[in-house]
Image (cartoon, helix red, strand yellow):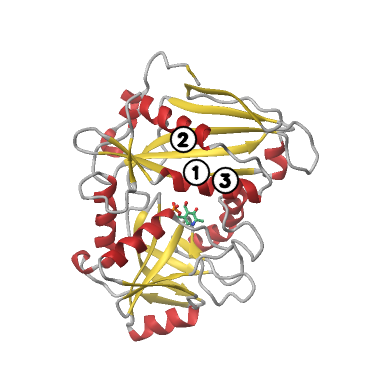
């Protein structure tokens, strides 16, 4: 792999105490091409614009998938990736569904590790802060023809981040629009899934909500996920999450949280979760907590759930009594190398 280093770092432009999501991008990016199934031109180079033909297939037919993952620092400036192989595998599941080539593990992992090593000074050290890493894969054939491309670009960029949301969330149960449908691409991290969610999310924001809670497209009775988060409910002291199916993106954060909860003796259920169960539980006070989880947000609890014309408030608990806050700390402690790593999730990034 070729490495072209920047002439002068931009890191001094960032205000370390005021890092919001996606404001600054690190000095370098990874770039590789796949031409007719052959991987060529792997390079780490200064972060910059790329030039594409206006005919590029990605602009017209949306053949694009991506990932989201994080690198963390501990107090001694060691750097850790969190479960990167899971992102690698999910990226290829997404690529396969969009009829794109498989990305070799060596391209993904070498590109990732070399890039993060070169830009390690961009990883913030404070608890809860990290370097958010965005691998993405796009079709670049210059032809206006609705068929899979022969030529692709795979890139990785990164951005130092703090908290995604600064407050507990107000969530609206969506009954008209759908994020995904059975047999579709909901389980994939396909770019178009996000574009199609923007309009209904904007409508919910205009009503005062932060996010939507998606329901199944055929009956709108079963809960799926929310924004870029999987969702969990604490019902009668059991941690319940909608069973992963082809409508739902199987989150690495959610599966990690479920494993942590189980390990600490919490009963975990992956099963269908109906709107009626949640509304009944909210009315009766049986739903103790509800929260979203994902790489960007880590864990963010819900303060209110809107359903039709009604707004249901979740119990107001002190943070010390919240399972969601406790789980978030367990996860962040592992990510920042402050506790044991019983599941071997941390990958210590070597210095090249
Ligand atoms: N659901 C959707 C639609 C997402 O975009 C994400 C974020 O990647 C998640 C769930 C959570 O997944 P993960 O925990 O792997 O970030």
Q: Which residue is mark 1?
A: 88
Figure disc tally: 3
Marks 1,2: beta carbons within 8 A: yes
Q: Position of residue 5 (x, y in %)?
A: 43, 16
Between marks 2 and 3, how big is the CA–CA gap? 13 Å
Within-10-Å neighbours for mark 1: few <14, some 14–19, many 20+: some
Residue 328, quarter of picture: bottom left
Q: Which mark is residue 43?
A: none
Residue 36, quarter of picture: top right
Q: Which residue is mark 2?
A: 109
At a point 24% along the width and 55% down the height, the residue shown is 329
Between marks 1 and 2, how big is the CA–CA gap? 8 Å
* First of labels 2, 3 by sequence position: 3
SS at mark 2? helix
Between marks 3 and 1, how big is the CA–CA gap? 7 Å
Q: Is residue 190 visible?
A: no
Q: Is residue 239 visible?
A: yes
At a point 48% along the width and 82% down the height, the residue shown is 276
Q: Which residue is mark 3?
A: 92
């Amino acid at each position: 792999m070729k490495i072209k280093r920047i002439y002068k770092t931009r890191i001094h432009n960032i205000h370390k105490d005021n890092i919001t999501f996606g404001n600054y991008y690190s000095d370098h990016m990874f770039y590789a091409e796949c031409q007719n199934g052959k991987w060529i031109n792997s390079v780490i180079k200064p972060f910059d614009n790329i030039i594409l033909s206006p005919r590029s297939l990605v602009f017209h037919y949306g053949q694009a998938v991506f990932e989201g993952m994080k690198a963390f620092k501990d107090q001694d400036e060691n750097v850790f990736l969190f479960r990167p192989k899971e992102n690698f595998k999910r990226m290829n599941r997404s690529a396969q569904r969009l009829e794109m080539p498989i990305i070799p593990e060596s391209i993904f992992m070498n590109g990732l590790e070399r890039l993060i090593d070169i830009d390690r000074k961009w990883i913030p050290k404070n608890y809860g802060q990290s370097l958010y890493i965005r691998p993405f894969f796009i079709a670049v054939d210059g032809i206006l023809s609705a068929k899979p491309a022969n030529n692709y670009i795979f890139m990785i960029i990164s951005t130092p981040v703090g908290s995604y949301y600064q407050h507990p969330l107000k969530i609206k149960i969506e009954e008209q629009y759908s994020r995904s449908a059975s047999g579709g691409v909901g389980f994939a991290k396909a770019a178009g899934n996000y574009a199609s969610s923007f309009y209904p999310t904007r409508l919910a924001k205009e009503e005062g909500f932060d996010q939507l809670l998606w329901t199944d497209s055929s009956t709108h009775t079963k809960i799926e996920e929310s924004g870029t988060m999987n969702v969990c409910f604490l019902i009668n002291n059991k941690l319940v999450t909608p069973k992963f199916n082809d409508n739902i993106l199987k989150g690495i954060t959610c599966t990690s949280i479920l494993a942590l909860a189980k390990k600490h003796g919490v009963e975990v259920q992956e099963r269908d979760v109906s709107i009626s169960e949640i509304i009944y539980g909210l009315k009766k006070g049986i739903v103790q907590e509800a929260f979203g989880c994902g790489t960007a947000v880590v864990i963010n609890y819900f303060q209110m759930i809107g359903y039709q014309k009604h707004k249901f408030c979740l119990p107001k608990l002190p943070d010390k009594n919240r399972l969601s806050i406790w789980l978030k700390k367990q996860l962040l402690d592992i990510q920042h190398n402050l506790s044991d790593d019983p599941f071997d999730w941390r990958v210590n990034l070597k210095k090249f």
